[in-house]
Image (cartoon, rainbow, N blue to C red):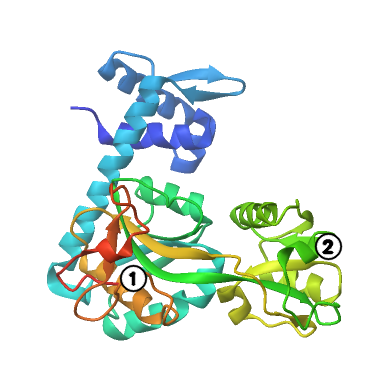
Amino acid sequence: MLDLHRGRILREVARLGSMTAAARSLAYTQPAVSHHIARLEAEVGTPLVVRHGRGVRLTEAGRILVEHVEDVLARMGDAEEQIAAIAGLRAGRVRIAVFPTAAAALLPAALAGLRARAPGVAVTLMDAEPPQALAALRAGEADVAVVFNHEHLPPDRDSRFREVELCRDPIRIALPSAHPLAAGPVRLADLAEETWASGCARCREHLTWACGRAGFVPRIAFATDDHVAVQRLVAHGLAVTALPGLALGLHSEPGVTVPPAPDLGRRRIAALVPAGPRPPAVAALLDELAAVAPPGTTGGGAGGAGGAGTVEAGGAEGADDVKDAVRTGGGAGR
């Protein structure tokens, strides 16, 4: 049987791209790391890393082994969580990876509810955009990933996870208050000659898609993940923008108006968790997230004793079809 400890070391080498960096991260010496990798290669009978520039990269065999190591570590984490939860919610932990807007708009109230319900549960937060949050979930470094995807795109699919939809967040146009079209209504094509500010990579992709449907390519001069900065650029007349409703609810900058505008679609905000039984602490957090989601925007039934609506992230019926959402019991709803 392969040595899982050495598998952890290989995973760190893969993550950092060098033996030296992995040794520093693990508080080992570089020769010790090299020795463990050599022993692991002897056990599997094939090279796992090759030199690449000033570091190393995984061979195909190394990549496959790291994927399995991550799966094993994730399962070990699940076992630790479930054992710790034998005494109910008096113990346990939840590691959550969440994008910044949801961290500000949804998480504080959800964590306050969780603390009141289960003060012994420890929570750690990782600020991460959806791709990074999904990577943390796959690597077993997070128990819950709160992510978003725009409705015109297929959901992120991975049969190892289950998805719990929290809400649908509308995208709105924001203009300087002195803009000639500030009173609305506004057609997206009316803004073809404007300078735009936009947020994260997914938000920019959605804006480009929406503008393309309206017959133009937006001239994006300002790109920042900071929604307050975006609104201040708009307030000073430097740009127009499209922002999600959650962001506008968190901050309303003087000098910015949100006029009636054509439907720019919505983004689906969801929590992803590993498939299978949910540890009580994770289930409790999902309940609290569902309870604080904006009312009237959820795609599936959520919250309460009946449990949250969930869909298989890799299911054949499609995660958007919330009418066919799979109900899960055990009080695990979110």
Q: Residue at x 32, y 86 (%)?
A: 116
* Crowding near the residue tagged with mark 2, few <14, some 14–19, many ≥20 C-alpha atoms within 10 Å: some
Q: Position of residue 298 (x, y in %)?
A: 39, 73
Q: At numbered mark 1, what does the secondary structure look like: helix, strand or loop? A: strand
Q: Tags 2 and 1 in contact by the CB under 8 Å rule?
A: no
**Which residue matches tag 1?**
122
Give the residue furthest to the top.
Answer: 45
Inspect this view and state whether residue 306 appears: yes
Q: Residue at x 61, y 65 (%)?
A: 264
Q: From this view, report whether residue 102 is shown above or below residue 148.
A: below
In the visual, does 225 lie left or right of 97? right
Q: Position of residue 85 (x, y in %)?
A: 18, 67
Marks 2 and 1, the one that precedes in the sequence: 1
- Say which quadrant the N terminus sits in: top left
Of tags 2 and 1, the one toward the viewer is 2
Q: Residue at x 35, y 83 (%)?
A: 113
Q: From this view, report whether residue 23 is shown above or below residue 42.
A: below
In the visual, does 222 lie left or right of 9? right
**Which residue matches tag 2?**
194
* Between 230 and 301, the one nearer to me in the picture: 301
Q: Position of residue 306 (x, y in %)?
A: 19, 77
Q: Residue at x 53, y 29 (%)?
A: 18
* Crowding near the residue tagged with mark 1, few <14, some 14–19, many ≥20 C-alpha atoms within 10 Å: some
Q: At numbered mark 2, what does the secondary structure look like: helix, strand or loop? A: loop
Image quarter of residue 260: bottom right
Q: Position of residue 326 (x, y in %)?
A: 22, 62
Q: Tell me which amino acid carries mark 2.
A: Glu
* Between 83 and 222, the one nearer to me in the picture: 222
Image quarter of residue 38: top left
